[in-house]
Image (spheres, rainbow, N blue to C red):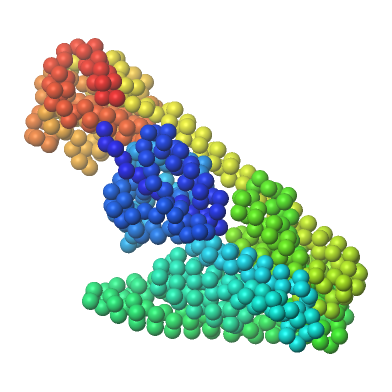
Amino acid sequence: MKTYQIIAATGCPTGIAHTFMAQEALEKAAAERGITIKVETHGQEGIQNELTQAEIDAADVVIIAADKDVRKERFSGKKVIDVSVGRGIKDAPELIQRALSGTVLVYHAAGGESAKSANQPGEEKPSFWHQIYVYLMNGVSHMLPVVVAGGVMVAISFMFGINSADPKSAEYNEFAFYLKSIGGIAMNLMVPILSAYIAEAIAKRPGLIIGFITGMIAFTNGTGFLGGIVGGFLAGYVMLGLSHLLKGLPKQLDGLKSIFLFPVLGIFIAGLSMWLLSAPMEMINKGMMDFLAGFQDSNPILLGLIVGAMCAFDMGGPVNKAAYVTGTALLAQGNYFFMAGVSAACIAPPLATGFAVLFARKVYSADERSAGYVNFLLGSTHITEGAIPFAAKKPLVVIPFLMVGSAIAAILTYLFQVQVPAPHGGFIVLPIVTHPLLWVLAILLGSLVAGALMAWNQTRSVQKQEQKTQGETQAVVAEKAAEPVSLSDVIRQDLIFTDVEAVSQKDCFKKLADIAVNSGLATNAKAVVSGFEAREKESTTGMEHGIAIPHTELAEISKPALIIMKLENGVEWNSLDGSQTKLVLAMLIPKGGARGHLAILSEISKLLVHESFINELMQAKTKNEIEQLFKEKVKNHD
């Protein structure tokens, strides 16, 4: 029996828990089948247990269980099973079984996605939106450590005083200056890194280079993390398009393409496009600042609603900055009222993510819980960006929840008449805040509401996914239970016929159809005959040595079966060796039962490669002899 060589690659957006859970699940499932598997992991520490080219070349099947880019193009020309990292954890035994089935389709890097057939049992049909998610998560996974590290450094610097990093301040501390400078540089890299690695997932190394440039344009022009996302997809698809347009150039120009044509054309097209997209955002920012300044004497509830929604909308992006810059400008005029609501609205989102993972620990992964707990520290020091990884995963759901929480915090701040004279610092500046306890209460109430909404949504999403997975599992179990699992299951003496008189192939089909209907295996004899004939038009089912294996898959067939007819005289069948057919092994397959058909056909094929078995089968005279011969050979083969 053939020994399969299986390799795998796993990876999740944050590269911590799920990556290695999938690795462990696949290794355990393989060990239970008595086979070995090598699993390459793509975690936060980089690629571990990396697959060599020799191992890839020797592999029969590759299992990819990842929600991020794992350089799939390496496996072009191999049989590939491509699923989410969650499937790798939950359905590892099924994935190993599918790898061993021999029915996995070949993946081709150039347009290779089409090689994954929707008809392949258990295969996830790739979608445009899933691919977009993978690209986005590749950017988030590389951005996350930068946000955490830089944010913590800036937060620690504030502990030495709100102005401790300012050389002109009496509070100046050189160590705090270094901490804030280092953290600030890291935070400034967030948008370029997000953009670059989204582009890298789409267009590989050429995309990475141009993605950094569009990301820097997005950062320079103040478009925030949303601009980084736009820049990443823009750079990736521009480079993908250039690759397609220039693929017709002679191979001798490959070097020129990589070091000149790609970067120059890419930076021109993507860079110019990103710059043009940034200009309207700057105009929108200025317009929003003027708009907000006009709300100084308006209803505090309306003002709080607007400020809160703006601050949480893009968390550091142009809309957020419009509110923040307006607040700092008003501070210079001695207005500390407006900035209090802005600060509360900026502090609430990261605290909300912390409460979300606290309320719903079981439905968040370990890495998400860790990030949420860190956000208690980041949020307390007015660092909003810690909430971005949570928002980036489900922007259309999470951002509105955060906007609600920030709006509540800002509204209550204005109602409590809180004043904050510092433009930053979070809870560190409490000693100089008017009504500090009421301010903290406003922020906590807004954060708790947003956190509860996030926890509810995450719990609901996980429950839906579990129900879906459970339903799929039950469907697979039901399908397997309904199908014959081996040739032994369909060998029945009452479906074996000897000394059958038939004058032609069509006569055989009619007799098979009558047997199927009379045995309760099918409901329509004409449909069965038509099914056999339609299959025969595709290619002959006449094998060598006088054997034919006709088969048909129809809705009119109620259960799978194998009908064996030994003919009195041979009939013409257009067989492979030109011989007349004397033994007919006819397979009846219910609609959608192709999995069982392939399993049985595989067993029959294995038996028919042995001439000794064929000779014994041809010499058998009775039903009992034929039945025992099949069952004995199947048992010995197993």
The quadrant in which the N terminus is found is: top left
| Residue 557 against residue 290 in the figure, above or below | above
Residue 551 to residue 265: above or below: above
Q: Residue at x 44, y 75 (%)?
A: 209
Q: From this viewpoint, is residue 34 visible? A: yes
User: For residue 516, which quarter of the picture?
Assistant: top left
Image coordinates for residue 634, horizontal then vertical, percent: 27, 22
Residue at 46 percent of width and 53 percent of height: 41
Give the left or right position of residue 395, taking residue 200 as reference.
right
Q: Residue at the front extreme? A: 174
Left or right, 578 with reference to 11? left
Instruction: Tell me where residue 343 appears, x and y as whole percent.
Output: 78, 72
Give how far across and how far down residue 132 sits, in percent. Answer: 50, 62
Q: x, y percentage for residue 323? A: 74, 78
Answer whether residue 495 is visible to the viewer in this image.
no
Q: Is residue 247 left or right of residue 234?
A: left
Which quadrant of the figure contains the C terminus? top left
Q: Which of 161 and 580 is in front in this view?
A: 161
Q: In this view, does 305 lie to the left or right of 93?
A: right
Give the number of callouts: 0
Front residue of this view, candidates 637 and 294: 637
Q: Compared with residue 532, is residue 304 higher up or lower down, i.e. above or below?
A: below
Q: Residue at x 28, y 75 (%)?
A: 254
Picture residue at 51% right of the left edge, 48% below the top: 20
Nearer-the-camera pick, 23 or 124: 23
